[in-house]
């Protein structure tokens, strides 16, 4: 795991690559597929010759396979889907225009009709397209809802494949059932998560761990209803 050995191995894997100290950025994609690579980040940081970025999904679920975490040597950045403001940027709305809208809101003043109608139109499109970058990019470049739907379905399929690949044993079927029940929960007037919607007679004892698996995998978020924070 020493840096010299790692650099030699990278050089062999990428013939012709020039790894120049102080000028080379190493980007390790899908790092969850190689748990030892996460441990190696510590040694690369200590060495300091190269800047390193690592990216990956489902990083919270294969923790048992990582020999040693590089605690204190890695700066973490969580990436999320586009929010509405970022969707506006993608559609060519300037940051200054977004700031103007915020100013109207802060002063509790109504937007001019033309601006209001345009924002409502974009918001409805955002509701349909969502914030997954690939789907948003397709919509912005082609404005083809059929292609957007195809991409959305492919992303859902990718999530299902990840569940089948990474969940352990009996957890596969339970995590899949919880994941597939989410639209049913969101379509209800009463939004509280109910295990009986996942399966008749379902309980927290049976499916609670599956929900936590989906959360640790970064597939879902919890929204807690608090009456007294």
Image (spheres, rainbow, N blue to C red):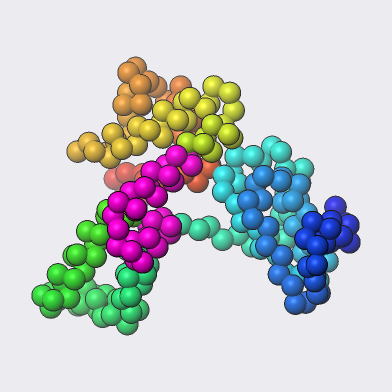
- Residue 141 visible in the displayed image: yes
- Residue 192 visible in the displayed image: no
Residue 16 to residue 109: above or below: above
Name the magenta segment's main secondary structure: helix
Q: Quadrant of residue 58?
A: top right
Q: Which residues lie in the magenta part?
A: 131-159
Tell me what residue is drawn at x 65 percent, y 46 percent. Answer: 32
The image shows residue 204 at horizontal and vertical percentages of: 42, 25
Is residue 151 located in the magenta-colored stretch of the structure? Answer: yes
Residue 71 to residue 182: above or below: below
Is residue 37 located in the magenta-colored stretch of the structure? Answer: no
Q: How many marks?
A: 0
Q: Quadrant of residue 28?
A: bottom right
Tell me what residue is drawn at x 33 percent, y 79 percent. Answer: 94
Tell me what residue is drawn at x 32 percent, y 44 percent. Answer: 225
Q: Quadrant of residue 83?
A: bottom left
Residue 141 to residue 190: above or below: below
The image shows residue 178 at horizontal and vertical percentages of: 41, 31
**Residue situated furthest top in the rendering:** 201
The image shows residue 197 at horizontal and vertical percentages of: 31, 26
Left or right of 89 on screen, residue 167: right
């Amino acid at each position: 795991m020493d840096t010299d050995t790692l650099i030699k191995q990278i050089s062999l894997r990428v013939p012709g690559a020039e790894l120049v100290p102080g000028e080379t950025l190493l980007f390790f994609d899908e790092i969850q597929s190689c748990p030892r690579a996460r441990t190696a980040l510590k040694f690369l940081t200590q060495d300091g010759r190269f800047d390193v970025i690592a990216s990956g999904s489902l990083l919270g679920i294969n923790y048992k396979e990582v020999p040693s975490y590089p605690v204190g040597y890695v700066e973490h950045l969580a990436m999320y889907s586009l929010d509405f403001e970022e969707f506006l940027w993608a559609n060519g709305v300037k940051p200054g225009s977004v700031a103007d809208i915020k100013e109207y809101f802060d002063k509790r003043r109504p937007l001019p009709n033309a601006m209001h109608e345009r924002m409502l139109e974009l918001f409805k499109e955002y509701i349909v397209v969502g914030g997954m970058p690939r789907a948003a990019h397709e919509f912005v470049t082609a404005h083809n809802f059929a292609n957007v739907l195809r991409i959305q379905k492919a992303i859902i399929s990718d999530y299902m494949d990840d569940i089948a690949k990474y969940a352990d044993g009996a957890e596969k079927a339970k995590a899949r059932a919880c994941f597939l029940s989410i639209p049913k929960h969101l379509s209800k007037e009463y939004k509280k998560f109910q295990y009986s919607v996942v399966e008749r007679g379902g309980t927290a004892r049976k499916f609670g761990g599956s929900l936590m698996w989906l959360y640790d995998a970064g597939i879902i978020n919890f929204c807690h209803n608090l009456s007294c924070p």
